[in-house]
Image (cartoon, helix red, strand yellow):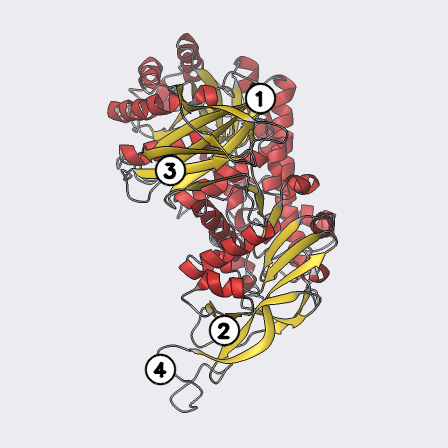
Amino acid sequence: MSKYQQSYRRMLVDMHIPDWDPAFLSRYDPAALAGQFTRANLTGAMLYCKSHAGLCYWPTRAGKMHAGIGGRDLVGEMLTELRSRGIAACAYYSIVFDNWAVETHPDWRQRTINGADFNSVIRYGTCCMNHPEYRAYEMAQLDDLLSRYEFDALFLDMIFWPLICGCDHCRARFRAEADADIPVTVDWTSPAWCRFQAARERWASDFTRDLMAKAKSIRPDLDVTHNLAPALSNWVLAQPLGASIHDTFVAGDLYGDRVEQLVVSKMLLHLSETRPAEFMTSVCVDLSDHVRLKNEQRMRAQAMGATAMSSAFLFIDAIDPIGTVNPEKYARVGRVFAATAGYEPFLGGDPIEDVAIYFSAHSQMDFAENGTPVAAVLTSGRKYPHLDAVRGACRALQRAHIPFGVITRRQLDELQRFRAIVLPNVLRMDREEIEAIRAYVKAGGRLYASRYTSLVEESGTRHRDFMLADVFGASFDSEEQGAFAYLTPADEMIATWIAPQRHVSCKIAKDPIRPASPLCGLPRLRSGSGRALATLTLPYGYPSRGSVNDHQWASIHSSPPWEQLSVPTIVTNEFGAGRAIYSAASIEAIDGEAETALFVGLVGSLLDGRFSSGAVAHPSVWMTTFDQPDRHRVMASFLNYQEELPPAPVPVRFWLRPPAGKRFRRLMLAPEGVVREFTLADDGALHADLGAIELMAMVIAEYD
């Protein structure tokens, strides 16, 4: 493991600066910037080698050197400065985004199926990964760079498809591989469309693999990674999560809310081949705002969020066009990292997780997109039904302090590690996933699944019934056609969880007039071997939405419950040695009191109310635990991550179960090393009171 990969406090200064003005970067001073890095308490830094502008900061033989730096070798100078300060060095290198390349070689550009490239309306020039000359150019650049300098790590940025490229090279490759033309319409129930999307993802993964192999052929001991953040967007960018298999460690820049950091941090723990993974975000409110700083409390909470997950944290700043930076930013970063540094000796280990939430790379789409012309798809985003359900499941379990993780198909062979698996509205699944889940439950695992999970294959084949119908204990019958429906308790525990509500509402269609698109509403079930925990209740006049003329409504503003049916909506089923709960509604996606209580209650019932750890604390508190068997201890952290900062202090009481066959013998507060009192229950669980915590508390529970 390189020195960079052993560091936790990292920073990157963006240098996406063109060279058409001689003032640009005229005052850039590597020694002065490295001095600011020291002020920022860094242990690792990324240094720019090639930016999105396509301009290099070393005397390249394959591309173009930035004209404003006067022929200086800024990479070599900065590398020397970092080494002299004991700061590990990671090379930053932009792929695909390369303005110089697309201006110099117009035929390298990504183009839509209509031939457009958008260079006249956006600042980013994008190259096609399938163009052989472009690929050769990047390989030659990496050869030149890595043969000259000894970095600790290499970070490759932007290996994805900003456009749905329909250039001649993409058309020819798809024709050769699939014996078909690129489809002109998005359709997730069409094998032809799904085959093309799979090809786009495979091409990006193959290019990532080839770039990493090139780097390793020059520097075999080099740690390599690429920016994984685009892989969390919807399908448009087509950067696959599975490409993380080519990385030494996983890294990604994220700019969203607390829930995004929670979801991604949990996922990185299972995607990264080595730890720590790297969570990256900006010192300013976002990358588009050059000056508006996040307040120090927000920066500290984000950095502590990574620390709580035993991850490295990287702040991103952006250089001024003339080559200077705001020193006060680095003073602020220095204070933040001074607060996280003391926890570093206590980080690491294996996350202790009872529940695994499954993130499906096949489900980064929306069936509502079916029928959209490919030429009309111009932007990507982080909004799709499966992600809404994943975020909601994470949010609910975090608030309840139930130990959970976020996994992907890379963990299909390890499902038995988890006591329960959550499949949150997994819209497309392949046969390997289906068989792994079925085998897991049959062998004694517990499963929660919702909505359209397992109805459609990754290949685009829509089945008449759930592929996991035997596991769910219920079958797909049809789709609801109205605007509202209700889940009504058929079991006393459901009624207790949602009280004082007597029903849970389900909004079927987003549009108040038109029905939901196919596979976008609410499934209606047929009874099977499972026992109904909740049944379907419909409003008056259903499925009519009601009008002045038809009288098919009972209340002018809303659609109250009216007709209770025996149709199941939530079902529990014994399958083999295991048990499953299926919900026709993705209740986990809804941030409501009753829905959250219902989802948490259902998951808790799958675990028979027994968890490996827990806390009595404010819902804002993130509790995470790691087993460190080599040090004979469990590390538990408590992050008071409130929406409004600085956080108000909150009391925390908690308990931990020891690893099998172990007994806790001492509890201390990190990083101070203060020994704390605790009690042991009859089952060996450690119970302790931390009093009120402000932002972060960490405890070390040592066992025999």
Query: Given the image, on which type of amino acid does mark 1 rest?
Result: Asp
Task: Single out the residue that lies furthest toward the top.
Answer: 84
Q: Who is closer to the viewer here, 167 or 344? A: 344
The numbered mark, 3 or 2, whose residue comes first in the sequence reads: 2
Quickly name the residue at label 4: 556
Q: Secondary structure at mark 3?
A: strand
Q: Pointer 1: what residue?
A: 704
Amino acid type, callout 4? Ile
First along the sequence among labels 1 and 3: 3
| Image disc number at residue 642 | none
Foreground disc of the pair 1, 2: 1
Residue under the point 60% across and 74% down:
567
Residue that numbered label 2 is attached to: 485
Q: Nearer the viewer, mark 1 or mark 3?
A: 1
Q: Is residue 468 left or right of residue 225?
A: right
Label 2 to label 4: alpha-carbon separation: 16 Å
The residue located at (49%, 59%) in the rendering is: 598
Task: State how far apart marks 4 and 3 are (Cα).
Answer: 46 Å
The residue closer to the viewer here, 680 or 304, is: 680
> Image quadrant of residue 475?
bottom right
The answer to which of marks 4 and 3 sits earlier in the sequence is 4
Give the spatial CA distance, label 3 vs label 2: 39 Å
The amino acid sitting under disc 3 is Val
